């Protein structure tokens, strides 16, 4: 379990000494019996099954509920590291929100020539309906997940911004619950920042974004596509934890200029909708007319200021990887500061010079579709076959604006518990950020995803990734 | 609470009760089959299938009755939409739907048992496992009701769930009695003649009333007594009278919570006047079958009214 130098090992330095962040954990770990830990590992899994923390997978034959593998070695971040990350995330998220407002209003950033207009004109997530409209409180990105990767002791990069509907926060919470249930004594020995009040913070943050016309305590509801959605567990979990109703499109109806839900004693207005339904399905009268997941007329109510939709429709533009490549410019334009958290160097295949570089160096690069997500539609040069590389060469040549390329990052590793003891695996980190007019609130922790296969750099749960509890140490 | 969530809770408990009652029925059938010769045993399984309301489906698939075939059909057959596996799947599905209206303890009781039942019914169930499997299903009901009693607020969610339980339970008892009602006929005309006590024992077992009945009647088994017990004894939690008064209490609580009464309360009151002061002789005079048909219809109307009063669907 020593770092071999090629990748940054978060637990141990190249000499094999335990780093500061993991000192408390390793102390405890050394006192543990492997057999006992192994038993706990099985226990953790059955605990997840019991509580039903699963995601749904559908094949042609039947539905299946799967567990995302959980690894019981925590991913640890020191208080000082976290403070630094927090500042960078705050800066980035406030820039993202300002950028959204600008894109749907005066488009100063385009007038200033800092980003090209085609970037969003060609973007399916761009919604003309949002032009000239300001959502309640001026907030677009109520809930954001910023995906970070680490490559060195002081090197964190932003890999992706998830401003549409970041998921996974239920794992942040349940992973901690599971760890505390399995190893209470560990939490007595090592002081870790709590994450458990995230649902309360979320409820508060959403309530603070209620439309101006609301007097009294706003009614918040979580809008889910329903029990067949892969993330239904999370929707139900968050609604339950917030004490909010979990609604489906069929429960909602526009009545007297308000969105109202069908309760056992009649229709009751809803003030804030935390929706986990995509823009396209939100309003069959405005978008996809076949949608049965949405609420006919909700966009009219929204534009008249009668309801808050979180995140605001049209925020998906920010998840685009071509937009991502301009984030340093975006951050600087709206905050007047240099970005505190760097982007991963990104080559836009739309630019001729970059394209040439990308095509010449395909075997070393990671190529991504600009609208892709979930680790799909991606080429990892160093591990790709000649055939795959040839395929991407053609794809890029055909539709260059559809691709960006990045160097293969030396993602840091954190050990996982394997049959043979601890072994390093690559990890990333998704902290969850709540935005309201009052503040940007970042829960100390997040979702650490880990590539369970040795050497793999793909952390997505759909492709063999697992999760870990993420600790931010107290000072 | 959302109307859809109320609907989920109501049906979650209806299916739970139905699954549990089917397990009881199987349990009684298994015991009966053990004590009979092969020919009578075949007759028994046909009777179990009728009582479970699955005879047509079973006979469309199988030409003969054997125990193994019968209990596998009832427990897990993919072609049987009312198999215990399918019913418990509905319980869990509705629990997921109403997840944020039920306590974590109740959810886990349902989910854990669902995993266990799924596991036990993954493969055909042989003679050596069938009693265990039936016990697991019955335990699932007990655990869910226990978790509900011990951990849920006495709010709408609780009362919708309870209403589902008692409506379904009343239905199921009425169906069992109605299917066996021909057994009563001899007892009416030949007082004191030797009854097929095995049959009656099975009826009592299938509603877990054998022990209670023995205690109340000092081992004397006669059809009239059993009918009185299952229809009118309001101390027995699986009698029509008990289900009726429990349902009435739940509906009254719902009306209280909502500040107004609906059609369901009115129907309940009408049903009350019919059943109050009723004696078993009155029932026989009206005709047991007719009485049960009335009861079931009134139950169904109350169910529909609940769905309408509390906006389950629209």
Image (cartoon, rainbow, N blue to C red):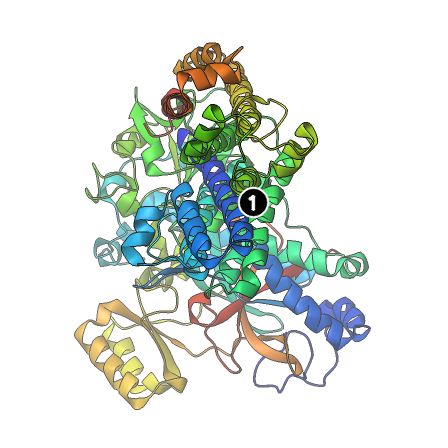
Residue A335 x %, y %:
46, 50
Q: Is residue A104 above or below residue A254?
A: below
Q: Is residue A346 visible?
A: yes
Residue under numbered circle 1:
B107
Residue B100 x %, y %:
52, 39
Q: Is residue B95 left or right of residue A391?
A: right
Q: Is residue A209 visible?
A: no
Residue at (53% x, 82% y) in the render:
A454
* Figure quadrant of residue A20: bottom right
Residue A298 x %, y %:
29, 32
Question: Foreground residue, B260 or A392?
Answer: B260
Residue at (64% x, 47% y) in the render:
A196
- Furthest residue toward bottom: A386
Subunit ID for the residue under disc 1:
B
Question: Foreground residue, A222 or B259?
Answer: B259
- Furthest residue toward left: A398
Label 1 CA crowd tier, 10 Å (few <14, some 14–19, many 20+): many
Residue A93 x %, y %:
47, 51
Residue at (21% x, 45% y) in the render:
A288
- Check the picture and name the quadrant holding the C terminus of chain A: bottom right
Total marks in image: 1
- Check the picture and name the quadrant holding the N terminus of chain A: bottom right
* Figure quadrant of residue B192: top right
Query: Of helix, strand and loop, which one carries label 1?
Result: helix
Q: Is residue B128 left or right of residue A264?
A: right
Residue at (40% x, 86% y) in the render:
A382
Question: Foreground residue, A396 or B202?
Answer: B202
Question: Foreground residue, A148 or B205?
Answer: B205
């Amino acid at each position: 379990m020593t770092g071999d130098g090629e990748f940054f090992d978060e637990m141990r330095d190249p000499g094999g000494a335990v780093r500061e962040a993991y000192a408390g954990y390793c102390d405890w770990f050394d006192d543990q019996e492997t057999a006992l830990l192994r038993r706990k590992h099985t226990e953790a899994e059955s605990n997840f099954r019991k509580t039903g923390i699963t995601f749904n997978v559908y094949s042609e034959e039947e539905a299946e509920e799967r567990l995302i593998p959980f690894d019981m070695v925590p991913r640890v971040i020191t208080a000082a590291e976290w403070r630094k990350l927090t500042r960078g995330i705050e800066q980035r998220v406030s820039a993202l929100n300002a950028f959204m407002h600008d894109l749907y209003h005066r488009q100063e950033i385009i007038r200033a020539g800092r980003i090209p207009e085609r970037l969003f004109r060609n973007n399916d997530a761009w919604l003309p309906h949002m032009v000239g409209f300001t959502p309640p409180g001026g907030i677009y990105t109520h809930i954001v997940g910023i995906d970070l990767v680490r490559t060195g002791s002081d090197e964190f990069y932003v890999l992706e911004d998830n401003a549409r509907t970041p998921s996974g926060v239920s794992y942040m919470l349940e992973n901690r619950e599971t760890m505390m249930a399995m190893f209470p004594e560990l939490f007595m020995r090592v002081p870790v920042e709590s994450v458990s009040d995230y649902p309360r913070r979320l409820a508060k943050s959403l309530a603070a974004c209620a439309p101006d016309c609301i007097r009294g305590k706003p009614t918040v509801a979580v809008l889910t596509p329903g029990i067949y959605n892969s993330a239904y567990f999370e929707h139900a979990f968050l609604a339950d934890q917030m004490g909010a109703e979990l609604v489906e499109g069929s429960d909602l109806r526009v009545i007297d200029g308000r969105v109202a839900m069908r309760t056992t004693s009649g229709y009751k207005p809803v003030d804030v909708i935390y929706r986990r339904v995509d823009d396209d399905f939100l309003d069959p009268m405005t978008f996809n007319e076949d949608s049965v997941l949405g609420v006919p007329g909700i966009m009219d109510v929204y534009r008249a200021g009668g309801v808050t939709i979180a995140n605001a429709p049209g925020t998906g533009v920010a998840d685009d990887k071509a937009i991502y490549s301009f984030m340093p410019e975006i951050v600087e334009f709206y905050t007047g500061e240099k970005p505190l958290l760097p982007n991963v160097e990104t080559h836009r295949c739309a630019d001729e010079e970059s394209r040439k570089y990308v095509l010449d160096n395909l075997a070393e690069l990671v190529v991504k579709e600009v609208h892709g997500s979930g680790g799909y539609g991606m080429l990892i040069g160093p591990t790709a076959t000649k055939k795959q590389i040839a395929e991407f060469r053609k794809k890029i040549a055909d539709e260059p604006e559809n691709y960006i390329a990045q160097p293969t990052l030396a993602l840091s590793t954190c050990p996982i518990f394997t049959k043979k003891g601890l072994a390093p695996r690559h990890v990333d980190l998704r902290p969850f950020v709540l935005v309201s007019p009052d503040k940007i609130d970042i829960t100390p922790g997040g979702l650490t995803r880990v590539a369970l296969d040795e050497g793999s750099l793909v952390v997505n749960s759909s492709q063999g990734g697992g999760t870990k509890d993420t600790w931010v140490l107290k000072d | 609470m959302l109307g859809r969530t109320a609907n989920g809770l109501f049906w979650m408990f209806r299916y739970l009760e139905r699954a549990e009652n089917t397990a009881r029925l199987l349990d009684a059938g298994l015991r009966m089959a053990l004590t009979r010769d092969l020919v009578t045993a075949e007759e028994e399984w046909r009777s179990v299938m009728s009582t479970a309301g699955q005879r047509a489906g079973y006979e469309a698939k199988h030409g003969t009755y054997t125990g193994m075939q019968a209990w596998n059909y009832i427990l897990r057959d993919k072609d049987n939409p009312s198999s215990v596996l399918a019913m418990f799947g509905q319980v869990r599905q509705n629990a997921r739907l109403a997840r944020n209206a039920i306590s974590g303890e109740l959810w886990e009781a349902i989910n854990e048992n669902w995993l266990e039942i799924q596991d036990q019914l993954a493969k055909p169930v042989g003679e050596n496992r069938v009693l265990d499997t039936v016990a697991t299903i019955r335990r699932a009901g007990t655990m869910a009701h226990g978790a509900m009693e011990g951990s849920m607020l006495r709010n709408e969610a609780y009362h919708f769930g309870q209403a589902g339980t008692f409506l379904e339970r009343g239905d199921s008892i009425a169906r069992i009695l109605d299917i066996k009602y021909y057994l009563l006929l001899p007892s009416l005309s030949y007082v004191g003649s030797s009854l097929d006590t095995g049959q009656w024992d099975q009826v009592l077992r299938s509603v877990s009333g054998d022990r209670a009945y023995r205690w109340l009647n000092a081992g004397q088994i006669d059809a009239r007594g059993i009918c009185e017990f299952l229809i009118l004894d309001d101390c027995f939690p699986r009698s029509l009278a008990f289900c009726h008064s429990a349902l009435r209490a739940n509906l009254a609580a719902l009306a209280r919570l909502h500040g107004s009464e609906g059609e369901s309360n009115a129907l309940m009151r009408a049903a009350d006047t019919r059943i109050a002061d009723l004696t078993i002789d009155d029932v026989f005079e009206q005709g047991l079958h007719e009485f049960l048909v009335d009861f079931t219809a009134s139950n169904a109307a109350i169910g529909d009214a609940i769905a309408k009063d509390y906006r389950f669907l629209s």
